[in-house]
């Protein structure tokens, strides 16, 4: 048993994570989440990977494309999962809305979570912006649905980027509170975020203090997984650096240089070289040397994934087959857990 679980949880360990179908995936999604999904699968974990379409609709329709586009966006994210290396025979890949347990458990958890806990979530403040009064109630309770996503499978480990840390803490609080309120010690595990490692926080190429994001209006702020070699080179060339000039030779030299730290971190995450090794190699050199090397490393890593992605996307019937099979397997795990949850809550049953 790892420190994932409260002392009394004795079920199997399982990985769960998801990505929203709200647009093209970018390098932050890839390094912070997708690449880790694949690594965990290859380490032999029992993995459940979801396209979280119920989360997408918490935002205005123009963000997720509305009813005409959400299914094709879901196929796109599923294709990116497969292109990155997720094997649907080893891992479960499905759309969140196809498995009813997410919504049912989310409602029960809405009645377990406390207003004060949810009000503290900083991502709601970021996403709702200045006009929080006009944000959907769904956007506010999004982290509660996230707890349900994870716990409907009694998942113990959740690979995510740094931005999701606070939501994972809330999931642990909800699991713990449910176990206590319903006198069921160890019924739900307390899920542990898997955040560490390179790529956990990839920043905008235009502002090293803002995370790389699909919703940033500037396409130059991010590398999309569908960008070709020329576009990647152009974006890296235009990436913001600073007036201090050359690359530093050690990690102390990165202090106060967020844009440079971000580019070095990306290089390290892509190549597997440590940040120290990257700085040793490029320290004292100008960005005219480092940036082309970074662009080349990125293209070498991403080009095969992009090519596979396009191939997979060209066969929507096969993607649908994978998603339908995944939904049936996900439901087979979640349905008996929900049966137990209903019994614990005490709902009527004939
Ligand atoms: N910049 C990032 N660095 C590292 N990890 C990141 N993730 C997102 N941005 C970064 C991780 O990607 C996973 C899926 O995220 P999501 O698409 O479900 O939602 P998000 O976090 O809201 O992603 P975006 O790109 O920032 O979308 P918008 O702009 O719509 O808000 C998560 O594990 C996340 O941590």
Image (cartoon, grey):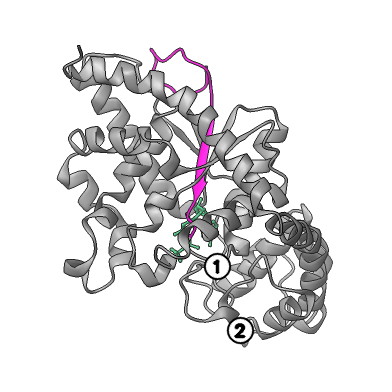
Residue at left offset 38%, top offset 20%: 337
**Label 2 near label 1: C-beta < 8 Å?**
no
Q: Position of residue 286 (x, y in %)?
A: 78, 82
Q: Is residue 99 left or right of residue 12?
A: left
Q: CA distance from mark 1 to mark 2?
A: 15 Å
Name, please, the residue furthest toward the front: 317
**Residue 128: mark:** none
Where residue 260 appears, x then y in whole percent?
Answer: 64, 73
Q: Is residue 154 at all visible to an observer of this figure? A: no
Q: Is mark 1 within 8 Å of ligand 1?
A: yes
Magenta-drawn stretch contains 19: yes
Q: Could you tell me which residue is drawn at 36 percent across and 46 percent down? A: 167
Q: Residue 30: name its quadrant.
A: bottom right
Say whether residue 290 is left or right of residue 330: right
Q: Which mark is residue 242?
A: 2
Q: Nearer the viewer, residue 272 or 185?
A: 185
Q: Nearer the viewer, residue 254 or 219?
A: 219
Q: How far across and how far down the image is residue 16, in percent?
A: 51, 36
Question: Going from the N terminus, do you reach mark 1 or mark 2 first?
Answer: 1
Some atom of ligand 1 lies within 8 Å of the CB belonging to the residue at label 2: no
Q: Is residue 7 magenta?
A: yes
Which quadrant of the figure has residue 243? bottom right
Q: Main secondary structure of the magenta part?
A: loop
Q: Which residue is mark 1?
A: 203
Q: Is residue 111 above or below residue 33?
A: above
Secondary structure, mark 1, is loop
- Residue at image x 48%, y 71%? 209
Magenta-colored span: 1-21
């Amino acid at each position: 048993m790892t420190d994932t679980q409260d002392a009394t949880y004795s079920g199997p360990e399982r990985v769960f994570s998801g990505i929203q179908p709200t647009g093209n995936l970018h390098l932050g999604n890839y390094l912070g989440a997708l690449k880790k999904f694949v690594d965990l699968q290859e380490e032999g974990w029992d993995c459940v990977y979801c396209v979280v379409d119920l989360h997408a609709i918490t935002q205005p329709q123009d963000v997720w494309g509305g009813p005409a586009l959400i299914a094709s966006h879901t196929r796109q994210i599923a294709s990116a999962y497969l292109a990155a290396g997720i094997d649907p025979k080893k891992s479960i890949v499905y759309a969140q809305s196809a498995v009813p347990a997410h919504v049912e458990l989310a409602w029960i958890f809405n009645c377990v979570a406390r207003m004060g806990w949810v009000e503290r979530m900083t991502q709601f403040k970021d996403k709702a912006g200045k006009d929080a009064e006009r944000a959907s109630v769904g956007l506010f309770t999004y982290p509660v649905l996230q707890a349900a996503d994870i716990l409907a499978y009694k998942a113990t480990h959740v690979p995510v980027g740094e931005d999701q840390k606070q939501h994972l803490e809330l999931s642990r609080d909800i699991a713990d509170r449910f176990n206590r309120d319903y006198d069921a010690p160890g019924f739900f595990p307390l899920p542990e975020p898997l955040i560490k490692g390179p790529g956990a926080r990839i920043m905008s190429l235009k502002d090293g203090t803002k995370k790389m994001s699909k919703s940033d209006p500037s396409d130059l702020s991010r590398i999309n997984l569908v960008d070709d070699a020329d576009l990647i080179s152009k974006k890296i060339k235009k990436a913001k650096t600073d007036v201090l000039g050359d690359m530093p030779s050690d990690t102390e030299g990165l202090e106060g240089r967020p844009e440079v730290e971000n580019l070095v971190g990306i290089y390290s995450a892509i190549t597997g070289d440590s940040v120290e090794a990257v700085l040793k190699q490029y320290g004292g050199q100008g960005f005219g040397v480092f940036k082309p090397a970074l662009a080349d490393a990125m293209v070498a890593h991403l080009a095969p994934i992009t090519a596979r992605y396009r191939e997979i996307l060209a066969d929507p019937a096969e993607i649908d087959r994978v998603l339908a099979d995944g939904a049936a397997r996900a439901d087979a795990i979640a349905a008996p857990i929900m049966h137990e949850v209903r019994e614990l809550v005490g709902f009527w049953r004939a």
